Amino acid sequence: MTNMIMTYMASVFPVACLIFNAILLAAIISNRKNSTLPLAYITVMSTNGIIISLFISLHMLIYLVLSDETYAVYLVKWGRETTLGGTFSYLNYLLVSVLMTVNRVVVVIRPFNELFTHKRIFVYCGIIAILMFISLFIPYISPCFIVFNARKLAFESGCAPGRHAITVFQNTYAIILPFSCMFVNLGLIFHLKCVRNNWYKKSLLLICGKKPNGTEPTTGAIQSATMSKIQARRDFIMMKQTIVVAVYLSIYELGSLVVKLAPNFFMSLPQNVKDGYFYFRLESVPLMNFIIYYVETGSTRKMLRRFLNFKTDSSDSVFNATAVGPAPRTLTRTLTATHSRSRTASPIN
């Protein structure tokens, strides 16, 4: 009985996530002229959210409405295709997060480059999607295809217990991507904080045995201090977002790692606990966009509430939270111009 309740919830919950992602996609399209929003990234992330929510809900609903015999026939005829669709959107999430991280690194190194315009980001995401589809299509046409069995809550290989080499590689190393992105982003935040507070220069002077000279605050220094406070807030929000992205993209992978490291302990747990643990891992992925773009990000939350004609909180602003994505060029140039007068580094979204 408990298992069926969890299955029903696992069927309905992705539908709510699908609706949110559809609204997010419609809202960003209607606000496509707003240069302060990362149009390309939100479009790609919401599209991925729609796809993965659709396939997870489809898997569970079909399992609920079909008998065991009919469901077994369905898995033979359509199981590979639906599994391919869900896995594609999940792995696409992982690689797009890598692209976002590379974007931030490039902006720090070359603030005014043209490598990450909206059009080019769409091209990069398209290339990522094509490469990811090819990597999944090769196992799909091989004897070692993968099928998600909702009755067993397991991914089954056509050549079990073996798996295709590409599948083994993806299962083994996928967990590295979100954690690498998190550490790189945290490193960028620390670097920008050091630059903004002249910690590098002060540390060099201390190493050389010199004492940093104190000076009277100038107009430029006051402006720089004001912008530094704003940027500190942005860095804090950015830190939370990178942690959220890493956690949500690694929940499933971490769960799989725990099962591999402690199989005896996991098998000793009650069946309801094991099923609930699997559903928690599975359902965390469709929820990710809601957490990132509504709960954690004030600018997109305000955009969504305006799109739905809801009342907006006055505390929601572009400086209240920074959307996951590249810095808007106009905002970056304005902030950088202010910082350049006081010889500090340009900020980054």
Image (tube, rainbow, N blue to C red):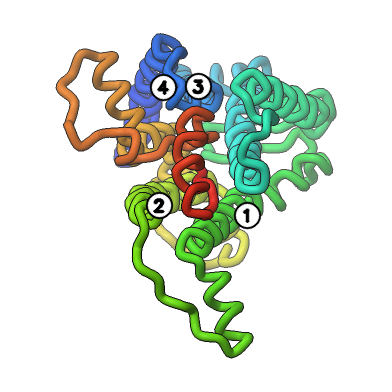
Q: How many angstroms separate mark 2 from mark 4 (CA)?
A: 43 Å
**Closer to viewer: mark 4 or mark 3:** 3
Instruction: Report the disc number at residue 39.
Output: 3
Q: How many angstroms separate mark 4 from mark 3 (CA)?
A: 14 Å
Q: How many angstroms separate mark 1 from mark 3 (CA)?
A: 24 Å
Q: Secondary structure at mark 3?
A: helix
Instruction: Report the disc number at residue 180.
Output: 1
Compare marks 2 and 3 and give the one earlier in the sequence: 3
* Image location (x, y in percent) of residue 134: 79, 26
Question: Looking at the image, is 122 positioned above or below residue 341?
Answer: above
* Image location (x, y in percent) of residue 208: 63, 86
Instruction: Report the disc number at residue 21.
Output: 4
Compare marks 4 and 3 and give the one earlier in the sequence: 4
Image position of 281 (left or right of 291): right
CA neighbours of label 2 inside 10 A, class few (<14), some (14 to 19), many (20+):
some
**Residue at point 45%, 32% (across, down):** 331
Instruction: Report the disc number at residue 220.
Output: 2
**Residue at point 40%, 39% (across, down):** 322
* Image location (x, y in percent) of residue 157: 72, 37
CA neighbours of label 3 inside 10 A, class few (<14), some (14 to 19), many (20+):
many
Tell me the amino acid under the disc marked 1. Answer: Ser
Q: Secondary structure at mark 4?
A: helix
Tell me the amino acid under the disc marked 3. Answer: Leu
Q: Are marks 1 and 4 in contact (CB under 8 Å)?
A: no
Image position of 278 (left or right of 94): left
Compare marks 1 and 3 and give the one earlier in the sequence: 3
Q: How many angstroms separate mark 2 from mark 3 (CA)?
A: 33 Å
Compare marks 2 and 1 and give the one earlier in the sequence: 1
